[in-house]
Image (tube, rainbow, N blue to C red):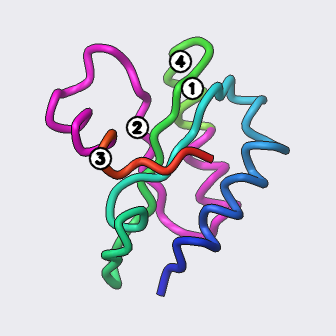
Amino acid sequence: MINKEHIITLLKEYKKNQAEQFGVVKMGLFGSVARGSVKKDSDIDIVVEFKKRNLLNRIGLKMSLEDYLDMPVDVVAYRGDLNPLLKERISRDVIYV
């Protein structure tokens, strides 16, 4: 079972030590892990604000986080034109690290 506090600790360490190489400005946990409603097949949803939006940075970050956490990760790049429903869900659940 995924432990929310453990994931938050790992994400804080990751952001401090590795996230800059991908241009990460801000990173947060949202979704089922943040809400504490994890299921067996849950992935880890992470919202990221990048210095400069770049698909390669997003893909690289996703792969790096999956290796680091040893779990499936979904990375959402936060931007102004994000789907309003997704924006609302993120703002309701997000725990920034």
Crowding at dot 1, Cα within 10 Å, few <14 / some 14-19 / many 20+, comes out as: few
Label 3 to label 2: alpha-carbon separation: 15 Å
Residue drawn at x 64%, y 65% as measured from the top left: 69
Disc nearer the start of the sequence (1/2):
1
Disc nearer the start of the sequence (3/4):
4
Residue drawn at x 40%, y 37% as measured from the top left: 76
> Is residue 81 or residue 55 the one in the foreground?
81
Residue 52, image quadrant: top right
Q: Which residues are magenta?
A: 61-90
Label of residue 56 in the image = 1
In the image, which is nearer the foreground, mark 3 or mark 2?
Answer: 3
Which type of secondary structure does the marked residue at label 4 adopt?
loop
Which type of secondary structure does the marked residue at label 1 adopt?
helix
In the image, which is nearer the foreground, mark 2 or mark 4?
Answer: 2
Identified by mark 3, the residue type is Arg
| Discs 1, 2 touching: Cβ within 8 Å | no
Disc nearer the start of the sequence (3/2):
2
Q: Position of residue 56 (x, y in %)?
A: 57, 26
Outermost residue, front side: 92
Label 4 to label 1: alpha-carbon separation: 6 Å
Label of residue 76 in the image = 2
Identified by mark 2, the residue type is Val
Outermost residue, right side: 17
Residue drawn at x 67%, y 60% as measured from the top left: 67
Identified by mark 4, the residue type is Asn
Label 3 to label 1: alpha-carbon separation: 28 Å
Residue corresponding to mark 4: 54
| Discs 3, 1 touching: Cβ within 8 Å | no
Count of marks placed on residues: 4
Residue corresponding to mark 3: 92
